[in-house]
Image (tube, rainbow, N blue to C red):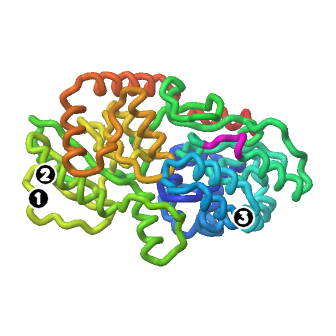
Amino acid sequence: MRVLCTTLGSPSHGRAQLPLLRALAEAGHQVLVVTTDALAPVFRDDDVEVKAALPEFDPVGMLGPDLGELQDVGELTLSSPALSRLLMRALAGPGVKPHLDILRPLALDFRPDLILRDGMDMGAVLTAELLGVPQLPTPSGFSNILDPAEVLPRLNERRRELGLPERDDPLSVVPHGRVDYVPPAFSFSLHLPPSLSYRQTVDVERYGVLPGWIAELPADRPLVYAAIGTALPVLREQKSAGAPLLPVKMPEAAESLEEILRAAAELEDCTVIVSTSGIPVDTAGLPGHVHVTKRVPQPLLLESVDLFVTHGGFNSVREALRTGTPLAVLPHFGDQYTNARRVTELGLGGHLTDRDAHGIADLCRTLLADPAPRARARSAQLAMLTLPDIGQAVADLENIAG
């Protein structure tokens, strides 16, 4: 079987695909990943072919003339429904053409039997329809918040332009379902139907190992881990390079890290590990119970963590569900706000609405003292362990591809 996979956005989108693509490659299937220059290194340790041919994901460019609609909204926030609707429509707007012009000839040359796509990639939806092959989105936060009814009108416009039949069913964007690593009872999807669900792995990256200093940490106190993910540093770099950004005020990653470090200093009865994702921070004067690192193999560390302070990206949420780790979510953009609300609804932790150090520290103390989030997180972990191994996806996808 020949499988084409597309990846956009941040490294987390590629990380979500790695276990699935790895299983397909190990089963002898040929896998081609079409992605951007920035994301190609995510796949370097796996037996897949990579073509860094796609343009970098540019939400401002995709919105184009639709940006004018935002002027009538008033004060716009990252959690505004108007912004979400506009972004969804833009995914299948005229701005998809440059992406499609690159992907379509690559797909025609590769002749895939199946397309696995980034949840934001409507160009891959159209490519699959042009080739007459099935397509499924891979796990992503955007798939969770995607409203097919918002996408359908624009998607039908593109279908008409390409000579494809229009569809009446909004779910024509996922005619074969979707892949997920979350049990149905703990789903974060708002609109899409039940998925092909497999067990989230703790071995996402090959050769992952925790640094030796972690083994020397005291084991007689709660261990708190804080991280901001991979997308925020990418957005920070784009802003520094002068890239056009949405006209929306977004929390600064560096400021969030500073507040997290101040909160960590207050948690004197805990051991706290803070991962900065490479963003420079001032560590002068931090007490000895706070340990700062650029990066750590997160799925492995979460196996021994009592509380995870996170930006709320869907990768991080899934990895915490897999290890039964309660969450304190400090969202910054996109699906992270929805994920924070869903974490609270499911009883898996709390939403950090008070973003300063005292607010972060207070919620951490509350969650550590309350046995309910830990018990609920353990229930999610047990439900996760009832899902089939990712290897089962190979046979399921073979059946879909015929």
Task: Check if mark 3's residue and mark 2's residue have beta carbons within 8 Å.
Answer: no
The answer to whether mark 1 and mark 2 are in CB contact below 8 A is yes
- Taking the image as shown, residue 171 lies to the left or right of residue 334, namely right
On residue 286, the disc is 1
Q: Which residues are magenta?
A: 146-150
Residue at 89 percent of width and 50 percent of height: 164
Q: Which mark is residue 95?
A: 3
Give the x, y percent position of residue 208. 35, 51
**Label 2 sits on what residue type?**
Ala
Residue, far bottom = 241
Q: Which residue is mark 2?
A: 265
SS at badge 1: loop
Q: Secondary structure at mark 2?
A: helix
Within-10-Å neighbours for mark 2: few <14, some 14–19, many 20+: many
Q: Is residue 232 above or below residue 175?
A: below
Decide if residue 40 is in sight here. Answer: no
Q: Main secondary structure of the magenta part?
A: helix
Q: Is residue 388 visible?
A: yes
How crowded pointer 3 is (Cα within 10 Å; few <14, some 14-19, many 20+) is rated as some
